[in-house]
Image: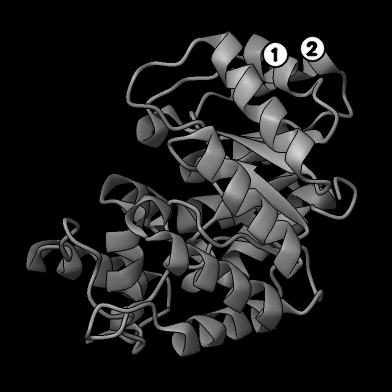
Amino acid sequence: MNASLRGIVAYPITPFTDAGRVDERLLARIVDDMLAAGVHALAPLGSTGVLPYLSDDEREAVAETVVKRVAGRVPTLVGVSALTTERTVHHARHAERVGASAVMIIPMSYWKLTDAEIVAHFDRVARAISIPIAVYNNPATGGLDLAPDTLARLLQIANVTMVKESTGDVHRMHRLVQLCGEDVAFYNGSNPLALAALVAGARGWCTAAPHVIPRLNLELYEAVTRGDLAGARRSFYRQLPFLQFIVAHGLPRAIAAALELCGTPVGPLRAPLRPLEPERVAELRRILVDLGVLPAA
């Protein structure tokens, strides 16, 4: 799995019908669009997919829809995080059963977990499935910050093989390489850090941006891969305003608004999330016009 999971890892939004149900038909179309654009992997049930806001049945419907639609054409990395270890194991087993290539886990906690508790959590999930596990470190959403030393401990668990680092601190990636060796499989999850992370050796970039600007995302990765750093910088700084916007205003809100501006409404956000304010939508429209995604008014 580590060898095959490289490049642009796209995180599809979870669309809803007007009645508030998961829109599986539209989700399948979004997957088709991303595959047609050339992304290298699909990762349902991440932050953009509003995983914590979904019921167990909804989560399983999303995972099954995406994995079946992909049909093995690219790797699938399914988010299975839950507040309890028992539910995380449940979702991990389901993801494996429907054919996911790997699962991704962010430790979620009401009480701050100790390192020993985090290690035990991952170890128990790892013992329950046979597919690879990616550790997702995103203290901004999960409430826990996994230091490089802790990540290195988790990578000693048999099928914990990947790290998605979303803190926006490229020095953590360097430290992880120092601890685990140059072959460690780490992926960038901080959109504004994409250029620095890829240059630092990240195997891929996990992002929701391919909903709107897949060509630029792929262009950046390909430029870094062939050693064209000048081209990579040009591509990165061109898309940076969009990357900064979607992070600053929340991925589900921003991606939903961008898709609606592009003619693909994805339904109401799951409460308590609310749509972007009109002035923010106007700002986003200007960014998309500058990128050539939308025509000038």
Horizontal arrangement in the rendering, residue 130 relative to residue 280 (left or right)? right
The coloring applied to the image is one colour
Residue 19 position by quadrant:
bottom left
User: Going 49% across and 62% down the picture, which residue do you hit?
Assistant: 209
Horizontal arrangement in the rendering, residue 15 relative to residue 96 (left or right)? left
What percent of the width, then of the height, locates residue 266? 33, 80
User: Going 47% across and 42% down the picture, which residue do you hit?
Assistant: 82
Give whichever of 127, 140 is nearer the camera: 127
Residue 118 position by quadrant:
top right
Helix, strand or loop status at disc 1:
helix
Residue 286 shows in the view? yes
Q: CA distance from mark 2 to mark 1?
A: 5 Å
Whether 171 is drawn above or below 71: the answer is above
Helix, strand or loop status at disc 2:
helix
User: Going 28% across and 84% down the picture, which residue do you hit?
Assistant: 296
What percent of the width, then of the height, locates residue 258? 33, 72
Whether 130 is drawn above or below 72: the answer is above
Q: Residue furthest left?
A: 278
Q: Are marks 2 and 1 in contact (CB under 8 Å)?
A: yes
> Residue 146's mark?
none
Which residue is under mark 2?
A: 178
Give the amino acid type for the residue marked by disc 2 in the picture.
Gln
Quarter of the image with the C terminus is bottom left
Give the amino acid type for the residue marked by disc 1 in the picture.
Arg
Whether 66 is drawn above or below 105: the answer is below
> Residue 175's mark?
1
Whether 137 is drawn above or below 293: the answer is above
What percent of the width, then of the height, locates residue 41? 71, 63
